[in-house]
Image: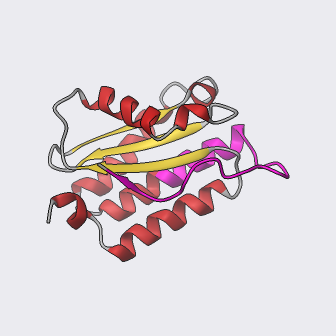
Amino acid sequence: MSKVEDFLTTEEEQAIVEAIRMAEKETSGEIRVHIEKTTSKVHFDRALEVFHELGMHATELKNGVLIYLAVDDHKFVICGDKGINDVVPEDFWDITKNVMAAQFKSGNFKQGLIDGITKAGEQLQQHFPYKAGDLNELSNEISKG
């Protein structure tokens, strides 16, 4: 079994999916988490590739956020689409990454992901509040590569 399957327990995955559901409850924004073992590409480039593979660029308001993890590489990237990048503070993703990294360094991967999802959700809620009729445009499930 690869480290991708071992990285989170079923219960941890369910808690992360629930964090995504709760974060998206108050926003039209979309949050996804993608986990894979490794990549030979520059991590940011691979995260952008996954962003497009998951159809995150196709949200109506361009307000998708991807949290990408390469487990064996000990690297992660947060990608926001144009709609959110245009409105969040310049250092927003750095602050979010620092919150997550602090948990990751302690081995608290589930909590690090939940903290990142929560921070992203707060910004999405501020700039893209939920409106009646908003659809969940993308799956909340963790994707794996």
Viewer-nearest residue: 138 or 18: 138
Viewer-nearest residue: 108 or 39: 39
Give the quarter of the figure containing the N terminus: bottom left
Residue 8: percent from the left, percent from the top? 29, 66
Viewer-nearest residue: 9 or 109: 9
Residue 82: percent from the left, percent from the top? 58, 24
Q: Residue at x 85, y 52 (%)?
A: 132
- Asked whether 16 falls inside the magenta stretch, the response is no
- Asked whether 127 falls inside the magenta stretch, the response is yes
Residue 75: percent from the left, percent from the top? 23, 41
Q: How many marks?
A: 0
**Res 14 → quadrant:** bottom left
**Res 50 → quadrant:** top left
Q: Which stretch is magenta?
A: 117-144
Residue 74: percent from the left, percent from the top? 19, 46
- Relative to residue 114, is residue 21 drawn left or right? right
- Relative to residue 130, is residue 15 drawn left or right? left
Name the colour scheme. Answer: secondary structure
Question: Residue most toward the bottom?
Answer: 11
Q: Is residue 59 above or below residue 30?
A: above
- Relative to residue 5, is residue 141 drawn left or right? right
**Res 112 → quadrant:** bottom left
Q: Residue at x 55, y 31 (%)?
A: 57
- Relative to residue 124, is residue 80 drawn left or right? left
Q: Residue at x 37, y 71 (%)?
A: 12
Q: Is residue 46 above or below residue 143?
A: above
